[in-house]
Image (cartoon, coloured by chain):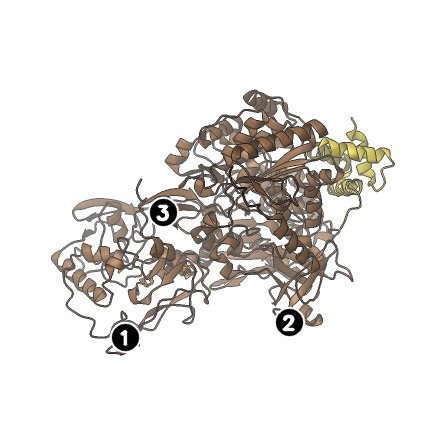
Amino acid sequence: MSHETSADKLVYMANQIGKFFASQGAEEAIDGTLVHIRKFWDPRMRNAIIAHLDAGGEGLDPPVRKAIERLRT
Amino acid sequence: MSLVHETDYGTPKSKSEKTVTLTIDGQPVTVPEGTSIMRAAMEMGTQIPKLCATDMVDAFGSCRLCLVEIEGRPGTPASCTTPVGPGMVVRTQTDRLAQIRRGVMELYISDHPLDCLTCSANGDCELQDMAGAVGLRDVRYGYEGENHVFAKKDGAANQNFLPKDESNPYFTYDPSKCIVCSRCVRACEETQGTFALTIAGRGFDSRVSPGMQESFLGSECVSCGACVQACPTATLNEKKVIEIGKPEHSVITTCAYCGVGCAFKAEMRGEELVRMVPYKNGEANRGHSCVKGRFAWGYATHKERILKPMIRAKATDPWKEVSWEEAISHTASEFKRIQKKYGRNAVGGITSSRCTNEETFLVQKLIRAGFGNNNVDTCARVCHSPTGYGLGQTYGTSAGTQNFDSVEETDVAVIIGANPAAAHPVFASRLKKRLRQGARLIVIDPRRTEMVQGPHLEAAYHLALRPGTNVAVVTALAHVVVTEKLYNEKFIRERCDWSEFEHWAEFVSLPKNSPEEVAKISGVPAETIRGAARLYATGGNGSIYYGLGVTEHSQGSTAVMAIANLAMCTGNIGRPGVGVNPLRGQNNVQGSCDMGSFPHELSGYRHISLDEPRHLFEKDWGVTLDREPGLRINNMLDAAVDGSFKGIYIQGEDILQSDPDTTHVSAGLEAMECVVVQDLFLNETARFAHVFLPGSTFLEKDGTFTNAERRIQRVRKVMAPKNGYADWEITVMLSNALGYPMQYEHPSQIMDEIARLTPGFANVTYQMLDERGSVQWPCNDKAPEGSPIMHVSGFVRGKGKFIVTEYIATDEKTGPRFPLLLTTGRILSQYNVGAQTRRTDNSVWHPEDLLEIHPHDAEQRGIRDGDWVRLKSRAGETTLRAQITDRVAPGVVYTTFHHPDTQANVITTDFSDWATNCPEYKVTAVQVSPSNGPSRWQEEYEEFSRLSRRIAPLEAAE
Ligand code: SF4
Ligand code: SF4
Ligand code: SF4
Ligand code: FES
């Protein structure tokens, strides 16, 4: 795999996290992803994914998109 | 200082709890039932003469030197093979005994060379000692008759004489000195479990023989050294002892190679290391070792070791040697410049799993307090970070649950994605010993490793799964346990949350998780999965040992949780013989994780955003810490490519060679303005470095390592650092130059700080370690003696947590262009990226990395054994030579990654574990095709390496 840009890479990583939490049930799908990203991503990665969301959020799975919306706060 | 002498009790310790009292030479003595008379005597301080007995192996009773008299019994029984009896009255020295012993010794000596003065074992020879002990004063028989001593007899060749075998790089075998006591043969069988030696021939003709009369090097011998240690004479002797002479003092220290953490006596002559001898009181290894720790330490004095600091403006310039002062002030000013220009977060560092706990702790302190950010990571990222996450989530601690001794009580061992025979050899020997006593083994691995089948060893089940399907297979095992009601309800109700269990049980019971369905994706027959699950759940104490074959996947963390679930639902947690045990790769991976090397947590696994621990550190360190997690290694490299990360301090890691997707790592390093590498050698990463700070070896510093069983053990300095400073001193100098003062005179003060700030280490001090030898964390007021086994009466997190582990196939998929799956591993004689072992004679066992390929796949491609092949993935290509073998299944190829010219990681992609970004080393889709030689990439690399390693000649002093 060769990720084109770093945004693609972050989207891929976020979706990967999302897939795990999706398997833990509907509620966890968003909460789990949110908490995980908040705990393990440094601020510049979090800002980059929020910026990506603001730019349309292409490629983000629906629950992950919701999680990132809430990451802002 | 003097040599550390260990008592040889003659026979192994009896484990019986019943005791027996007897009288030896008029003194009463009480010992456990089953103890030999010889051992009982030694315990009260009386050494009965002996030659064929030693306490590392079972008694054999062949030399007849250890005879004793027992009241009421006829004859003179051998004390090594006769167990004690209640009320026995034993005499160890009488005229009759003395006379028999002298007779025995006389016979031995009459067929032994009398060159004691020039013999390499002079002063360290049990034959010599016994001749003295029995009062041998003359030998009536000459060498005229048959003998094994001289090459010629009456001018003709002596048929009985065998020349020396010097084929092994580290020890020699001189048959003329052999007394055929078979201690070596028993050590190889019982301690090591390799069965490389036999006694060939009978009576006077009997000889020790490696394999079928082969040389040591040509035989099955893995050069563990157990036989050398067992040999009472100079027959098997270390070449270093022959070269240097007998050591005069020794110091106890810990091996710096793998996570077993073997304790050794470093035997010295002055500042010169003569040999490393495994220490019997070492609780991880119990007197055993492998070829790496025992013999492969020559790298410490290898000519390529860099001893002077060097700097350069560009990575393409030649290096310039500078003084320590200049190197340190240059580095500090570079980091300050970068932070000023690009911001506080534009720099970071990597701690080392090869360095001590104290050194690792200091590097992360330098970064958090000195740099003022949390951009710190460690190489554990690329190996066991999923273990930390997975076990943390399910059980509440980021570490294995058992000590190594626990294996002695296991009934069913499961090995998943690990090959301990190669990567954790001493643990493998201990496990094999247990297997020979009747324990059963299940191996889950794509490859038929040495553990699946070997001498006196056969796994009950081998689940040869397709790489990347661990989660599916382990969940299928749970499916069987749950649907066949083999789970331990009592344990679950007591220790876990029942409703969570029910939720999980419902999930694993789904038809998609049944062995029949999983067989389709994993390639493992359903019946094999069912059989293995039943055996693990019902076969007694079940223990799981796993390695990087579990963690280095995009679902690595999920797999760890699946394993944790399986152990919990069968109640295999919290007592000896069971548990979940990650086999840690490097010597101090556990320690580097414990010491707060990850960007999101402080030592003791406390998240940086938690106020309480952070305030504790802030107060102690006198700074304000950033409460946001920092960047991980791969994120640092991404950020470097993006231009927001510019400087890195790397202590003792070779990220260019050990991290995935070499091209991406190079790009990241190339984009930085200041790369500082602190290491023994100009490693691969140093190709991109601007500053090189020479590091020190484990022989040159004090500190501690923490092994895979959470055991904290001392590393002791036996010689002055050849580079001038121990690694921790270099970090201190750098920190001071950066303007964050650190003051330590000795690593023990750093440990005091660690203990003060880390609850699990609260009671650890150097004094305690000196007194007790070692201790397993947590060691605090709740567990003052340390914790050999965890979760004994409940899980650390409270209730054990069952987590649903849905199998999600990796996106690294095979297809028409890349039809094969590559998986990677290690071999015994080399260590990790090989920087150290390649610089020792260990290379005789592994001169190059080979690609293992199944005969079917090879034939399809017209590849013959030994041919050069091209290995190509979506990320890159390399060439290496093929080895055709059915150890791998069709569709799977395998290689090691010990040599930089192969660069297996040019091939691996940058897919990684969803939770921790641990790279997916174990699955890469590849194509293999015939080739004529090294790829263009390898040639370019070769050339660049040569250029980047140039050191400018020193300018003449003015
Ligand atoms: S070195 Fe180890 S493997 Fe080799 S013969 Fe001796 S005991 Fe056996
Ligand atoms: S080589 Fe040493 S240990 Fe082996 S039989 Fe000969 S004397 Fe004994
Ligand atoms: S490499 Fe591992 S098994 Fe070998 S001696 Fe060192 S710690 Fe022991
Ligand atoms: S030591 Fe007992 S027979 Fe050799």
Element at label 1: strand
B367 vs B656: above or below: above
* Chain ID for yellow: A
The amino acid marked with disc number 2 is Arg
Depth check, front residue: A25 or B246: B246
Query: Looking at the figure, which quarter contains the N terminus of chain B?
Result: top left
What percent of the width, then of the height, locates residue B802? 65, 41
Q: Which residue is mark 2?
A: B864
Q: Nearer the viewer, mark 1 or mark 2?
A: 1
Residue, x 25% and y 72% (percent of image)?
B147
- The answer to whether B111 appears left or right of B343 in the picture is left
Viewer-proximal residue among B294 and B18: B294
Residue found farthest to the front:
B958
The colour one sees for chain B in the rendered image is brown
In the rendered image of this protein, does residue B608 appear above or below residue B825? above
Cα separation between marks 1 and 3:
37 Å
Location of mark 3 (residue): B267
Q: Which residue is mark 1?
A: B152
Q: Earlier along the polypeptide chain: callout 3 or callout 2? A: 3
Residue B595 visible (yes or no): no
Name the quarter showing ligand 2: bottom left
Q: Are marks 1 and 2 on the same chain?
A: yes
Judging depth in this view, the residue of B659 and B767 nearest the camera is B659
Residue B297: percent from left, percent from top: 45, 50
Q: Check the image and name the residue furthest to the left.
A: B95
Type of amino acid at the residue the image marks with label 3: Glu
